[in-house]
């Protein structure tokens, strides 16, 4: 089956101010991935690992430096992001942003916020068509119609999150890219949004790329998880299996840092030291070695490749943990 | 020993559009060396309660009843100037958004020095030495260099450590941490929370942790107070609450936690919204309109916390 979206060797670097001349931050470094139609994939890692940059590359909101990107088998990286924004493919990939308070225009009502992408991408023939689509999607995400006339400041955080999702869903995308959609919500609000996303996936057959540092949420929603560290994927595989028994020491550190109700106190041992730097990393060393409890001499002299470990699992480690 | 004992605290906001009854006879205790978790949905009054204790409420707010005894003195009854003298020295707070809480145009070292200079005036080099020690205490690597750094030069985790350094600089007896790790990733959260817990036990500080993350409360708190719509509905030792919550809201809150669920179907959002606190006809139990166990007796007021076990109390006519 053709993947819905496929990326090969994606690279995005940024110039660094204040660092040595010509220094580049390698936010996304030769990264490859594929998402199948209707699949839910989690993308996780610490702040600064490059996951938000990757999400923006895949959504074609920023230009890539190198690599190939195809949507339903059609290359899209050759098109400039300006051209892509007005192309018929734009509606197939939609993004839901982190903080609905900051990503919604404060002067638009919920109706206008949702109608905006309809007008921009679907060329509606009449006002009635816009209204029909907005009402249908409001019902789909469980946003009462009486709320559509309100501006963002008259909506609760959970209602704003639903407006953000409705805005993305209204153009009937095949891939939703969600950047920490639940981090500003309390537990009950998170539960509502997670159940909504699972239902949209079932009913609208939309694939989800779910960017989050909350592993509990990834475990509940996603089939597959990719763990990112300093611009690279260091582990991937079925979400439950990876989070239950990580093979990469970095994934294990992330998992043990997440509090679990009923868990013991000793489980949570924070990583020592500060994260390594993604500024011109040594191409001949593992990027995690400075914080890795298992680092050996080989790790400082050879960068490990992402290696298949069977059962759909991969890890970028010379000495993967026992499964 | 109770470092802080809050009883019957009620707070109203008087707005042009009406009166918001933000807190309704709230009671809780914080003990030296322990962490008390205050949990509940957004808007349940967790931060209002903390701000009332510290005298940081908005000018539109009025404390209409209650007291907050801190080491034998009522914080709510004392003159504002007296309380301001305690705040920053004996009473400290770590805010939710560390970058917003710090002054963007002063170096980290200068900001810690400001707090020390205000409460324990000393020559400049002595203040500098104390500020450096404060940064070292929160285990910031390379503290000499970080003294000169501005908030925008530091990561969110480092900014929050600087915020904790400021809070702890004058050896407080009570530390209120208001969602100190929201927005930080799990590894940084573990570093910050381990630090707060170590400070509490090593220095005998009473800590109040305000959070909506129940798994975080489980890992770090000794006791937990659950709030809903401005009322404390249950207070219990951590194990007792998580093993058997007696208040229907506390029970539902636990069931809605992603950390507690094995799959999405097990995740139950809490039905309905908290009542509008501007309503004149608020029921005695503010959860009753969302509660499946409601009966006529629930509408007979007033509602008080009743003991149901060792250190375990619930404000419910029909507890689970």
Image (spheres, rainbow, N blue to C red):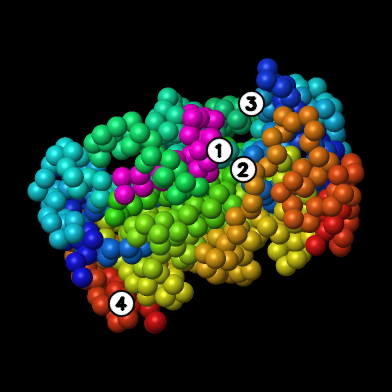
> The residue tagged with tag 4: helix, strand or loop?
loop
Query: Do residues under tags 2 and 4 come within 8 Å of each other at their CB atoms?
Result: no
Q: What label does residue A122 carry, if any? A: none
Badge 4: chain ID? A
Residue position for label 2: B42
Residue position for label 3: B118
Q: Quadrant of the C terminus of chain A?
A: bottom left
The answer to whether residue B18 is above or below residue B222 is: above
Badge 1: chain ID? A
Q: Is residue B275 left or right of residue A233?
A: right
> The residue tagged with tag 1: helix, strand or loop?
loop
- Residue A236: image location, x then y, percent: 32, 69
**Separation of disc 1 and disc 3 at Cα?**
40 Å
> The residue tagged with tag 3: helix, strand or loop?
helix
**Separation of disc 2 and disc 1 at Cα?**
10 Å
Badge 2: chain ID? B
Snapshot quadrant of residue B26: top right
Task: State the residue lying farthest toward the left.
Answer: A78
Query: Do residues under tags 4 and 1 come within 8 Å of each other at their CB atoms?
Result: no
């Amino acid at each position: 089956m053709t993947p819905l979206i496929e990326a090969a060797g994606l690279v995005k670097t940024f110039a660094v101010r204040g660092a040595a001349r010509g220094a580049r931050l390698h936010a996304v470094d030769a990264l490859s991935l594929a998402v199948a139609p209707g699949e839910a994939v989690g993308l996780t890692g610490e702040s600064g690992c490059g996951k938000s940059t990757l999400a923006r590359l895949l959504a074609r909101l920023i230009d890539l430096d190198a690599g190939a990107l195809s949507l339903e088998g059609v290359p899209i990286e050759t098109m400039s992001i300006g051209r892509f924004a007005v192309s018929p493919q734009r509606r197939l990939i939609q993004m839901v942003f982190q903080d609905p308070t900051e990503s919604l225009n404060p002067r638009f009502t919920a109706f206008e916020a949702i109608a905006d992408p309809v007008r921009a991408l679907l060329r509606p023939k009449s006002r009635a068509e816009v209204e029909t689509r907005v009402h249908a999607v409001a019902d789909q995400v469980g946003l009462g119609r009486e709320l559509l006339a309100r501006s963002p400041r008259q909506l609760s955080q959970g209602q704003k999150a639903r407006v953000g999702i409705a805005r993305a869903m209204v153009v009937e995308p095949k891939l939703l890219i969600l950047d920490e959609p639940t981090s500003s919500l309390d537990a009950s609000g998170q539960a509502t949004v997670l159940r909504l996303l699972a239902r949209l996936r079932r009913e609208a057959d939309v694939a989800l790329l779910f960017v989050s540092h909350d592993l509990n949420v990834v475990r509940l929603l996603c089939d597959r998880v990719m763990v990112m560290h300093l611009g690279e994927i260091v582990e991937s595989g079925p979400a439950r299996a990876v989070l239950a028994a990580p093979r990469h020491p970095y994934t294990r550190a992330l998992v043990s840092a997440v509090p679990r109700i009923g868990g013991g106190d000793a489980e949570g041992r924070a990583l020592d030291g500060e994260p390594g730097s993604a500024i011109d990393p040594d191409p001949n060393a593992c990027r995690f070695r400075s914080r890795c409890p298992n680092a050996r001499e080989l790790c400082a002299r050879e960068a490990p490749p992402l290696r298949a470990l069977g059962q759909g699992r991969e890890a970028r480690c010379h000495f993967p943990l026992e499964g | 020993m109770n470092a802080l004992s809050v009883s019957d605290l009620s707070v109203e906001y008087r707005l042009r559009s009406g009166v918001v009854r933000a807190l309704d006879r709230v009671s809780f205790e914080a003990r030296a060396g322990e962490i008390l978790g205050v949990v509940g949905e957004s808007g349940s009054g967790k931060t209002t309660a903390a701000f009332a204790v510290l005298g940081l409420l908005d000018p539109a707010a009025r404390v209409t009843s209650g007291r907050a005894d801190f080491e034998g003195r009522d914080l709510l009854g004392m003159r504002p100037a007296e309380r301001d003298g305690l705040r920053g020295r004996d009473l400290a707070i770590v805010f939710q958004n560390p970058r917003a809480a710090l002054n963007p145009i002063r170096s980290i070292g200068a900001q810690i020095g400001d707090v020390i200079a205000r409460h324990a005036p000393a020559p400049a080099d002595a203040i500098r030495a104390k500020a450096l020690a404060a940064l070292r205490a929160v285990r910031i690597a390379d503290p000499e260099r970080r003294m000169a750094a501005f908030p925008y030069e530091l990561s969110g985790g480092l900014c929050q450590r600087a915020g904790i350094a400021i809070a702890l600089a004058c050896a407080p007896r009570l530390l209120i941490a208001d969602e100190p790790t929201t927005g930080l990733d799990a590894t940084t959260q573990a570093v910050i929370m381990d630090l707060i817990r170590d400070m509490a036990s090593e220095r005998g500080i009473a800590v109040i942790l305000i959070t909506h993350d129940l798994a975080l409360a489980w890992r770090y708190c000794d006791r937990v107070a659950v709030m809903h719509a401005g009322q404390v509905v249950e207070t219990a030792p951590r194990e007792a609450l998580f093993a058997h919550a007696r208040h229907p809201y506390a029970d539902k809150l636990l069931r809605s936690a992603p950390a507690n669920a094995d799959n999405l179907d097990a995740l139950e959002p809490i039905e309905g919204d908290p009542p509008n606190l501007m309503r004149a006809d608020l029921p005695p139990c503010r959860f009753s309109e969302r509660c499946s166990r409601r009966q006529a007796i629930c509408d007979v007021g007033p509602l008080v916390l009743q003991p149901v076990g060792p250190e375990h109390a619930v404000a419910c006519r029909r507890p689970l």
